[in-house]
Amino acid sequence: MRARAAGINLAKGPIVLYNNIMINDREKYKKIVRELLRDPRIRKMQGYSQHQTSNSLKHSLHVAMVSFAMAEKMRLRIDEEVLAIGAILHDYYLYDIKESGFSDYRHGTKHPQTALDNAMKEFKLTPKEQNIIRSHMWPLTLLHPPKSKEAWIVCMADKFCAAKEMYGRRPDR
């Protein structure tokens, strides 16, 4: 089930002009993210630890919020719904990394496809949303580069958030 079918208003909100600069609709974005977070399928991500101090859902929410902030800072006009869905589902791989037996490298190269496969079983995704999920580990997944502004943003935000979560506020670093 798509977020669109879960009661989210699909009408494209007007781009607001402020000092002749196009900006995105922050409230629309927050509403989409809140609606996604209510979905029990997405809430399952809480059960999978990630980056030593987080879980997949918290990390994905962090990526979603940083992604929107990056788009605003760079003054990029984005599709709020595509960005939110891609950011929230980018790590929808639904397995425990420690119990998987994968090395860090193998997890890094494998989980984008696993996340995409899982997400496609549960949600109707646009090609752009699929690319965001599949390409978020680029350049590690060399043959699957980001193909849209939204995919590039999530790719960059994911790396920033992962570094912050792994090395940010830890007293031993």
Image (cartoon, rainbow, N blue to C red):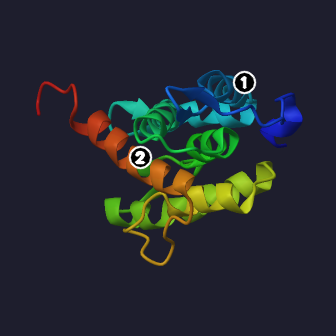
Camera-nearest residue between 84 and 47? 84
Element assignment for label 2: helix
Mark 2 or mark 1, earlier in chain: 1
Neighbor class of circle 2 (other Cα within 10 Å; few <14, some 14-19, many 20+) is: many
Q: Which residue corresponds to mark 2?
A: 158
113 lies left or right of 166: right
96 lies left or right of 6: left
Is residue 94 visible in the rendered image? The answer is no
Q: Which mark is residue 38?
A: 1
Percent of width and height locating residue 120: 75, 57
Element assignment for label 1: loop
Q: Looking at numbered disc 1 in the image, what kind of residue is underneath it?
A: Arg
Verify CB contact (< 8 Å) between mark 2 and mark 1.
no
Q: How many marks?
A: 2
Percent of width and height locating residue 41: 72, 36
Q: Which residue is painted at 36% across and 39% down in the image?
A: 161
Which quadrant, please, contains the C terminus?
top left
Report which quarter residue 170 is drawn in.
top left
Q: Height in image: 3 above or below 33?
A: below
Percent of width and height locating residue 112: 53, 60
39 lies left or right of 155: right
Which quadrant, please, contains the N terminus?
top right
Q: Which residue is painted at 48% across and 78% down in the image?
A: 143
Camera-nearest residue between 53 and 152? 152
Q: Looking at numbered disc 2 in the image, what kind of residue is underneath it?
A: Asp
Camera-nearest residue between 76 and 150? 76
Of marks 2 and 1, the one in the foreground: 2
Q: Height in image: 94 above or below 59?
A: below
Percent of width and height locating residue 154: 48, 48
